[in-house]
């Protein structure tokens, strides 16, 4: 972990940014842009709601983060150490009375099945779903220090697969965690899309069997390599759209028109990144643009916030916003652990 990463407190910044984007986008989800403007005024002046309540995006991020903390406390992170604690945290989230923020059906169905001790987790996985629930919560995997590339990729895909087993969900989760890690380590945002494209090409035919087991057999693919390549190819397609949009599309345009509405994992990644890359040095403007969208506003904004916070660190967020966010204590505790 670099000195720069410690100084800017990238983990704290990323987790706070994720939750702030989530809270900003919560009231605008399911609304079109004219309705949002009528309700909130000019998008570039949107204010954090009072109280600053988050959705299942932040709740599941914290569940994953706590599960990963338990797993890494036991030693080297591997699939056997990870599945139990993360599964338990996802089940606890599913049962919680605070799970009342319009959670995704895929997460609910999978978590119900994860409670069945007679089922391997692969049978709980919703193999046909590539919803953004796969990667709106994956930032912690990109923030934990000291993981190898194989551990980070495997953990990112496994946490997706517990609920969303579609190969594009796995690949998009891997890419999202990789983007967070690159930004936390000081990668230049101008080169980020190129780095992600290279990473996707390098991993296109790699199935992480140690982490995923025989998950691929639940699909209709002849080989595990064919299974995972489908996911990477869809991600490469949306990265092409992202690269073009960063260069040619006005930030005054609804970003969903350029890179997708964000209900599915690869589009949530691309549209969250687009908002971040439009406003690299203006993190609040990035969140506001992401929240004023015609698609899955809270998930798009939470990803934009995760990227901006990883890049700029904890100081990106004004105190009057950060101090009001729901679950602030949990977010700061995990951030401090991974920034230490």
Image: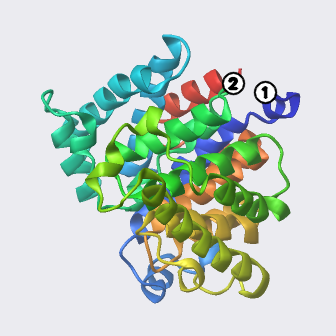
Helix, strand or loop at mark 2 = loop
Q: Which residue is mark 1?
A: 1
Q: Say whether residue 334 is visible.
A: yes
Number of residues whose C-alpha sits closer than 10 Å to that of mark 2, classed few (under 14), some (14–19) or many (20 or more): few
Q: Which residue is mark 2?
A: 146
Give the vertical position of 25 relative to 206 (above or below).
Answer: below
Is residue 7 or residue 68 the one in the foreground? Answer: 68
First along the sequence among labels 2 and 1: 1
Q: Say whether residue 317 is visible.
A: no
| Residue 285 percent location from the top left of the image | 69, 67
Q: Are marks 2 and 1 in contact (CB under 8 Å)?
A: yes
Is residue 17 rendered to the left or right of residue 267? right
| Residue 294 percent location from the top left of the image | 46, 80
- Residue ranking furthest to the front: 222
Is residue 206 or residue 132 the one in the foreground? Answer: 206
Q: Quadrant of residue 270?
A: bottom right
Number of residues whose C-alpha sits closer than 10 Å to that of mark 1, classed few (under 14), some (14–19) or many (20 or more): few
Give the vertical position of 90 relative to 289 (above or below).
Answer: above
Is residue 160 or residue 325 the one in the foreground? Answer: 160
| Residue at horizontal 40 percent and vertical 69 percent from the top | 263
Is residue 162 rendered to the left or right of residue 195? left
Give the vertical position of 269 relative to 294 (above or below).
Answer: above
| Residue 4 percent location from the top left of the image | 86, 34
């Amino acid at each position: 972990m670099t000195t720069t990463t410690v100084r800017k407190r990238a983990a704290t910044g990323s987790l706070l940014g994720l939750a702030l984007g989530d809270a900003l986008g919560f009231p605008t989800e399911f609304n079109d842009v004219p309705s949002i403007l009528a309700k909130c005024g000019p998008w570039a002046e949107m204010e954090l709601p009072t109280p600053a309540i988050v959705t299942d995006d932040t709740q599941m991020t914290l569940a994953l983060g706590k599960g990963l903390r338990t797993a890494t406390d036991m030693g080297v992170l591997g699939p056997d150490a990870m599945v139990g604690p993360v599964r338990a945290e996802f089940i606890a989230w599913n049962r919680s009375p605070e799970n009342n923020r319009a959670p995704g059906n895929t997460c609910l169905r999978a978590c119900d099945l994860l409670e069945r001790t007679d089922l391997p987790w692969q049978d709980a996985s919703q193999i046909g779903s590539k919803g953004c629930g796969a990667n709106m919560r994956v930032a912690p995997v990109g923030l934990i220090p000291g993981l190898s590339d194989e551990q980070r990729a495997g953990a990112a895909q496994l946490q997706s697969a517990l609920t969303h087993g579609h190969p594009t969900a796995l690949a998009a989760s891997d890419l999202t965690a990789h983007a967070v890690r690159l930004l936390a380590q000081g990668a230049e945002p101008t080169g980020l899309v190129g780095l992600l494209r290279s990473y996707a090409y390098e991993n296109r035919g790699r199935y992480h069997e140690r982490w995923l087991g025989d998950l691929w057999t639940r699909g209709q693919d002849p080989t595990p390599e064919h299974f995972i390549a489908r996911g990477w190819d869809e991600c490469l397609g949306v990265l092409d759209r992202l690269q073009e949009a960063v260069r040619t599309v006005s930030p005054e345009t609804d970003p969903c028109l350029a890179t997708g509405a964000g209900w599915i994992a690869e589009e949530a990644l691309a549209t969250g990144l687009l908002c971040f890359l439009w406003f690299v040095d203006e993190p609040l403007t990035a969140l506001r643009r992401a929240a004023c969208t015609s698609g899955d506003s809270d998930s798009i904004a939470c990803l934009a916030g995760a990227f901006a916070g990883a890049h700029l660190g904890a100081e990106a967020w004004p105190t009057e916003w950060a101090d009001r966010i729901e679950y602030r204590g949990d977010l700061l505790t995990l951030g401090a652990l991974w920034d230490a």
